Amino acid sequence: MLNDFFLYCVGSNPSNKVKDNGNTCRSHVRRFLLFSGEGQLLRGDFAFLKEAKVVSDWVQVLKEDGMKPTTIRVNLINIRKFVLFLKDQPVGVTKVSDKAFDRLLSQLKQRLRDLHRDVTIHRQKIRKSGRRNIVPIDSSKAFRKKTRRILPMKLSALEKDPTTKGLCEVFGLLAGYFISLSGHRTGVMANMLVSEVREAELEDNRSIIEVQSHKSAGTYGHAQVSVNEKEYSWFMSLLDMRDNFEGSDSPYFFFSASGGKCRKLLYYFQKEWKKMGLKGSFTFRNLRTSVVHYTKDLSPSKKAAVHRQMCHSEAVAAKFYLPLNTADEAAQVRKLQEGSSETSSETSKKQTVQETSQDSSQESSRETSRESSQVTSEETSQETSEETSQETSEETSPPKTSPKTSPPNSPPKTTPAESSAAVCMPEQSSAPSGSGEKRKRSSEGKLQGKKRAKRDISKFFAEEPEDVELSLDESDSSGSSDLEKFFVMHHN
């Protein structure tokens, strides 16, 4: 079952890195099964996995062994992968139900969640220690400068006297030179193939060696190693004398005597670093971390280009490679924080002053409008009272009459034409202000009209009109004769 699980992990066309990861995963699962199935493995099934408590017990064992939180996390992730693999197998083979698998997966998920805090703190400790192992930029430049000077001499000596010691020295110089320059992982140099070096073509005295097999090839594809004409000549010179050494039939450019890839590049680099008289002892990871550290102040576009060339994202760089701030950097951040707080306080004060001035101006404008409205209302009330008093005085004062007016009971002297016109168009008087005065004038108008009508009737029949006295009570239409009605209708 473990062999099937290994094939399930590596797939059909695995790289060397994938094979290494598959072997690690199989080793973690084997240890877990030996612990949880102690005394029950001979049954040939996995019924002992029904007890989900074994996950917590296994985590405790790993902690007692002194494993780091990150290593325990990798163990649990590999065990979860194996449980998912078993869940797809027939129940007759595993003897475990789906519900039991679900309980086991739930336990693994919870234990991984418990480790999250410890993993984060452990990574911060690693980054803090990496701050002390930043390669000084002067030392890195000095190493590359000396390498450019002594490497051609070592290649010439190696061509004359091909020794394994000389070859290892050249390997150490080449690996350290390009890792300190590009920030690539060790696997990029270790997995570089002879064919990949030969396929590189020079363009304007520059070339790119594209390495296919590396850790993040699934995301970023080939890892590019940029070289100039002189640097590319180092690789070609080493290829020309390659057949003089054991293991030269290896497909890897950095090969071992057994025909595999060279796994001691770091050791060879550290020996050459020490020979040059440079201070400190650094790893390839320190070189890679230093490249990230010295490029953190670049613009976002330039920083993204550097991270892309190193085959990792900015998030990965900040999580694993970017060291924590030093005391000087933390002090600079503090100054920024203090400056931003002072700026914000000054801004808030200015805003408060502006709001206060706005409130005072609004209050003064409201008071001004209130005073103007009061003055306007007082003037309006005075004008209204004056108009009311004038109308009242006009209504109460007696109407002005001319001295030559006739008494109200005597009919006015008019011509027949004027009388007929008066009948057709009754006299319109100005509307009085009071209702009693209006009724009085209306009654007088009707009375005069009836008197004119009687005189016209008398003239019509050539007779003298009789003196008929009509009172205000006879002004009603019910008191008129039929002849008077006829005459009025005839004139209308």
Image (spheres, rainbow, N blue to C red):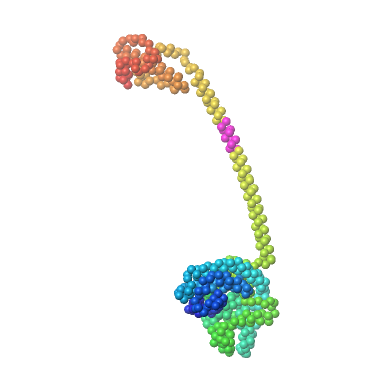
In the displayed structure image, the side of residue 103 where residue 421 appears, left or right: left
Q: Residue at x 56, y 89 (%)?
A: 243
Magenta portion: prevailing SS class: helix
Q: In x, y percent, where is residue 464? A: 33, 9
Which is nearer the eye, 49 or 269? 49
Q: In x, y percent, where is residue 343? A: 65, 55
Q: Is residue 456 above or below residue 373?
A: above
Q: Residue at x 50, y 69 (%)?
A: 100
Tell me which segment is drawn in magenta. 368-378
Say if the magenta span includes residue 134.
Answer: no
Point out the image quarter for the C terminus. Answer: top left
Which is nearer the eye, 178 or 117? 117
Q: Is residue 398 above or below residue 364?
A: above
In the displayed structure image, the side of residue 456 where residue 384 appears, left or right: right
Which is nearer the eye, 57 or 205? 57
Q: In x, y percent, where is residue 21? A: 54, 77
Res 116 quadrant in image: bottom right
Which is nearer the eye, 55 or 290? 55
Q: In x, y percent, where is residue 80? A: 53, 72
Q: Residue at x 59, y 36 (%)?
A: 370
Q: Is residue 312 visible?
A: no
Q: Is residue 399 visible?
A: yes
